[in-house]
Image (cartoon, rainbow, N blue to C red):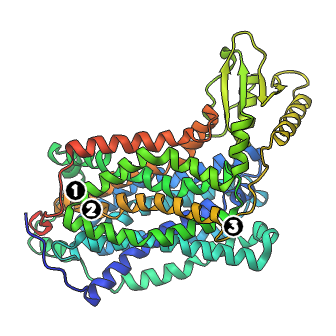
Amino acid sequence: MATAAAPRPMSEGEKMVIFASSLGTIFEWYDFYLFGVMTAIIGANFFTALPESTRNIFVLLSFAAGFAVRPFGALVFGRLGDMIGRKYTFLITILIMGLSTFLVAFLPTYKSVGIMAPIALIALRLFQGLALGGEYGGAATYVAEHAPQGRRGFYTAWIQTTATVGLMLALMVILGTRSYFGEGEFADWAWRIPYGMSGILLAVSVWIRLRLNESPAFAKMKAEGKTSKAPLSESFGQWKNLKVVILALIGLTAGQAVVWYGGQFYTLFFLQTFLRVDGPTANILIAVSLILGTPFFIIFGSWSDKIGRKPIIMAGCLLAVLTYFPLFNALTTYANPKLQQAIQKSPVTVVSEPTHCNLILNLTGTAKFNTPCDLARVYLSNSGVNYDSVAQPGAVATVKVGDKSIVAYDGLAANAKDEKTRFEKEVREALNAAGYPAKADPIPVLSSNWIMLVLILTILVIYVTMVYGPIAAMLVELFPTRIRYTSMSLPYHIGNGWFGGFLPAISFSIVAAQGNIYSGLWYPIIIAGMTFVVGMLFIRETKDVDIYARD
């Protein structure tokens, strides 16, 4: 263990290392935001054959496909990084990741080539996910191994801030393109422009990374002939290292991931899907909160050098567990007060024979529902309507909106199509009569509601900065130099790729199954709670570890 070194200004070389390493994070979040904001457009262009109600789920799954393969990329590129070096490995990953984003601009649509269009889209997402599996671990390791002792939290926190840069860059490009061409042209073809412009970012990234040198820790180890010949078997075949990998996943990255995705991506989804806030307003609210919250990445990264990584990360998880429900309720209060009033005054319930109500989790969007109870709940959840289910033996499935009742329909009946039209028309009329708004009222900038929404969203972003700001330094410090790239990449990408990446699809499916628009929050709350308990009991503090002594 070593004492923290006295703070000193960053050298120009260290600034270049941080900037070059951060470009991969910019790429990741640029693509992330493009995909998230343009869900409906991507669905209309690449999943045309599917019903509109299931397109979004397929788009989310296509998005999640990139996250699913991240751990495999961590194994492939982590191994290369520990064997041949950090610099060349994450030069390869930025090339693959950048090209995968850039080529989306040139993909043919479903109308042009049929099923090959979504296959090509998913293939690019898989390539990007594989490359990203090696990108973050390489960037974090590279920066940490350049940082002076006692300043790794501060140095690696700069990588995390660039996620906001990527999100902001995507937002500006999308809003600029939309404003210039108009919604019609943007939906038709101009959506490709933001993807095409990523080519500029790719060219700059490659040019800068070609100018970098190998990290001093790896160069020293290589010169001494101490590099690992089999980093995979050392990392995961020896219990002393595998144990740390498992604890890093359960006690750190799983909770960090759901707080990160819950506080940024799911909030955008929640505002637009359930609260009916228009896209531009929701994007601007998220963007402002990101700008206000981003400095806290550096603040918490720097604090972690003084008070430790663990207490800050654990506090972020605990705060999310304790406050997600009241904070998301507050979002409803200020984003769509008419909706909240309608829920309180005229609650929606589905009354049915309990044996007719099945589990309607639909992660793939391909499940078929035919019972009146299931069809009623599917329609309400797809419409973003908050409802409760009431089991009543022998009852005919009925949707109650306040004091009005609408009988559901049987999907297997001969007149099912006509009955579906009748049912949906009557439910919509009942919802309108009860004051359920089809969309949220405009929220003027700097109005009291707008300010409160920014405040709530900024709090959620600050939770993100608490769990994410110190995480890179802590993961680097947990593992020895010879297997560091491999060992830290796998738990990071299982956490962020699986626990975090599947959060939108899982949370939305929970809402669809339960009816309550807040029920999807149970997923991040349970995972963050698990991480808090495991982390507090089994994760050791690492801030004073001398990584040069760990080869």
Name the residue carrying label 3.
280
Mark 1 crowd level (few <14, some 14–19, many ≥20, 10 Å Cα): many
Could you say where residue 233 lies in the image, as x and y percent from the top left?
21, 49
Alpha-carbon distance for marks 1 and 3?
47 Å
Q: Is residue 544 left or right of residue 343?
A: left
Q: Tag on residue 485?
A: 2
Name the residue carrying label 1.
231
When asked about the image quadrant of residue 506, the answer is top right
Mark 3 crowd level (few <14, some 14–19, many ≥20, 10 Å Cα): some
Could you say where residue 540 lies in the image, as x and y percent from the top left?
17, 51
When asked about the image quadrant of residue 85, the answer is bottom left
Q: Secondary structure at mark 2?
A: helix
- Judge depth for marks 3 and 2 and give the one in front: 3
Q: Are marks 2 and 1 in contact (CB under 8 Å)?
A: yes
Q: Is residue 400 above or below residue 5?
A: above
When asked about the image quadrant of residue 132, the answer is bottom left
- Tell me which amino acid carries mark 2: Tyr
Q: Are marks 3 and 2 in contact (CB under 8 Å)?
A: no
Alpha-carbon distance for marks 2 and 1?
9 Å
Residue placed most toward the observer, 346 or 149:
346
- Judge depth for marks 1 and 3 and give the one in front: 3
Quarter of the rendering occupied by the C terminus? bottom left
Whichever of labels 1 and 3 marks the residue nearer the N terminus, that label is 1
